[in-house]
Amino acid sequence: MGARAFKEIYDIGEMPPTGHVPRYMHAQVIRRSRYGEPRQAFQVERMEVPSLGPDEVLLYVMAAGINYNNVWAAAGQPLDVIQARQRAGEPHDFHIGGSDASGIVYAVGSDVTSVKVGDHVVVNDNWWDRNDPFVKAGGDPMYSPSFRIWGYETNWGSFAQFAKVQAHQCHPKPPQLTWEEAGGYMLVGTTAYRMLAGWPEHTVRPGDVVLVWGGSGGLGSLALQIAREMGGIPIAVVSSDERGAYCVKLGAKGYVNRKGFDHWGPMPPSGNVEAYGKWLAGVRKFGRAIWDVLGERKSPRIVFEHPGQDTIPTSVFVCDAGGMVVICGATSGFDATLDLRYHWVRQKRLQGSHSATDQEAAALNRLVAEGKVSPCLSRVFNFQEISLAHQLMHQNHHPPGNMVALVGAPRTGLKGVA
């Protein structure tokens, strides 16, 4: 391999020989002193390549997905991820985010047998301590005290030339996908899969109406397709007719443009007759819009939620009797209100959902590998533009679908090593 094998650091897009790990790497780094807007929080720094534990894998990152969790990391809110890890005993005073990746295995820990150097993989985001007593006793790792979202609550994510993951997070990269197509669907796809398939008795059944908030976004675009593949009738909630048309192409029965309504936000007190009556009229109008899309008076059995504060009161109201509102986030705020009369009397379920199991991640990845679910790649950024991509997401100026940044891949369109 000559002198090239002994370089301490490689330029972005310059691939080290497979299996050769340099001492340093380029990374997009967040520090507490820069918390705020993503455009100021992320800066490229020269960092040491992390060492591995026995169950860990070092991944040469080809492409990294952009997700809302590192908008939060950049702001230091609602969780100061650096401070939280330092309080838990981690010495590092920085955060390298990124919870989605496609890449090549460059090194493995002593106990790793599921992948080997040279494997092309995609990564899901569920991380836990295998020595956690809860896990060792047979508890579901998803509910363990050590469970974390990789690249958000943990360090060494995909916004660097090398990322550190646990071996169980790695899944085979669908060979028909380019690195950029493969780099941005696992977090949103697995989250959506668990929300729709992971909560018996409320998994999607043939003919179920599934209302998907933010249907044109990265999470919603995968949810629409998964609901369609499960036999459901997905309906998207969007902010424009253009985005609605995008959702229809993904299999939505139709869409509701939320800009036609003005009742969003916390529900007014039911004792305030005038304000509550105005809110109730808006909610009922929204429910009729769903019926208009369907062509019949049929309410959603499952409501796929993530805006949170502004929409939860409406979601609970329009959900069918015996149905479920399943929520994985709160991009509009964390304080929720609802009219409990419509919740308990009509026996509805409000279910929190977070990340996905390895089995659910594998099931989602099979749907993508079989061509049944598209990654919905919308825009590709270069490594230097990772801050810009998060800024666009923060300001809700990002395009429909999923955004990805090239890291190790020298250009778009590659499916393997150039």
Image: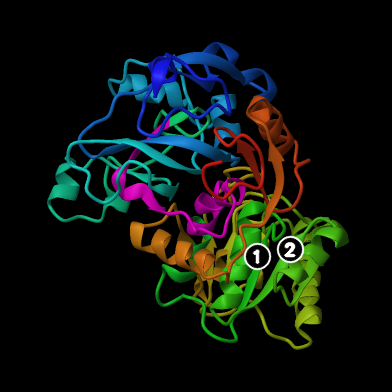
Query: In front here: 95 or 366?
Result: 366
Circle number at residue 237: 2
Residue 115 visible at all: yes
Name which residue type carries label 1: Val
Vertical arrangement, residue 59 with respect to residue 321, above or below: above
Quarter of the rendering occupied by the N terminus: top left
Mark 2 and mark 1 lie on one chain; the one further toward the N terminus is 1
- Residue at disc 1, secondary structure: strand
Name which residue type carries label 2: Val
- Point out the stretch of residues depicted in magenta: 163-190
Q: In the image, is 184 to the left or to the right of 275?
A: left
Residue 123 visible at all: no
Residue at (66% x, 57% y) in the render: 376
Quarter of the rendering occupied by the C terminus: top right
Q: Mark 1 — residue?
A: 212
The x and y percentages for residue 10 are 50, 20
Q: Is residue 127 magenta?
A: no
Q: Are marks 2 and 1 in contact (CB under 8 Å)?
A: yes
Q: Residues within 10 Å of mark 1 (few under 14, many from 20)?
A: many
The x and y percentages for residue 81 are 45, 27
